[in-house]
Amino acid sequence: MRRLSFLFALLLLASCGLDRPEVARVGQAEVDPAELRQLVSLQQALAQLSGGGCGQPTAGESGEAACDRQALSGELLWLGVEGYASDHDLVAGDHDVNEAVDQLEAQVGGEALDEALAARSLTREDLQELGRKILTIRAVRSAVAEDEIGAEELRRLYGERILEFTTIEADHILVETEEEARTEYRRLRDATRSEFEAEARRVSTEPGSEDTGGSVGRAVASTFAEPFAAAAAALRPGEVSQPVQTQFGWHVIYLIDEDVEPFAEAKPALIEPLADEAFQTWLERRAEELDVSVNPRYGRFESRTFSVSAVHTTDPDGSVAPSP
């Protein structure tokens, strides 16, 4: 009876590991040890070229284990986005991949690049494939973030941050009091640019205005004091503003030219500050859909970042089991 109980216990222990992947599984895709070793070799080659380490070891973790985690995390993220990328035609093309590799070569030198790869039995094709994955992940991140944030919210943010996307060229007259500024406005509201600049040379208190004619040059509106920027952006070229107060004094502004970046071109800048949060929210849902599994010997899978974190024996649920 005791022997049967012992055999039954062994069967239970064996069955617990039957569905555990050798390295990791994302949906139907498996990462096997040979694939992981090649991924690690690529990370080591890049680390050598950058002069840094492969992975960031946590307390008590070996450098080798940290490098494994980094390489595996990158591959898990790729497998997590691969289907979406294919469905939405977001896979990076040869031109972009070659351009990225060329940039790396320009930074480290072609000979050093080839030596680092050859030392690990890698080829340029292996590097290009890694580059394709990285560029595709970036494209998916942006596309997913745009969907998660939504067009209405992006339009609202565009209007709220319009001064960041507006470039102005202007002249101004700076005086000390509102009364002086109103006098200048009444005198100049229908003035030509040359007339405005002549007056700026005569009365403006800004240092150097006698030479510049009150020119502030051409710059993004948001780089100016907010009241000045808002007043200038509200004008049409050739118009003169009502008096505007900033911490420097009172201004009257003549708008020479204005260029507003269209919403479609501004979208990447609107999305970027929100992209990580939106992408991570999507990744959590994706992890549930794909049923990701990582062999505990490599660490613990973190669904929010689709990465592997280190597991220590002191972790409450971090007992490290041997691979099947």
Image (cartoon, rainbow, N blue to C red):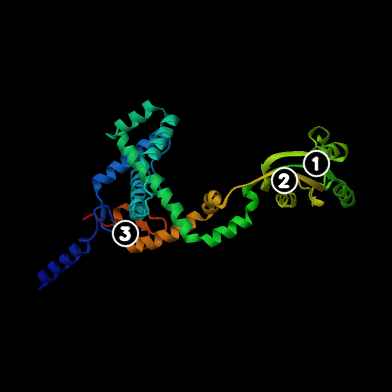
Which residue extends farthest bottom?
Answer: 1
16 relative to 124 in the view: left or right: left
Residue 237 marker: 2
**Image coordinates for residue 238, horizontal then vertical, percent:** 75, 45
Q: Which residue is mark 1?
A: 192
Please say if 17 is above or below 183: below
**Image coordinates for residue 7, horizontal then vertical, percent:** 12, 67
Q: Which residue is mark 3?
A: 292
Q: Earlier in the sequence, mark 1 or mark 3?
A: 1
Q: CA distance from mark 3 to mark 2?
A: 58 Å
Residue displayed at 39% across by 47% down: 136
Q: Answer whether residue 26 is visible to the viewer in this image.
A: yes
Cβ atoms at labels 2 and 1 below 8 Å apart: no
Q: Earlier in the sequence, mark 3 or mark 2?
A: 2
Q: Secondary structure at mark 3?
A: loop
Quadrant where the N terminus is found in the figure: bottom left
**Image coordinates for residue 50, horizontal then vertical, percent:** 43, 35
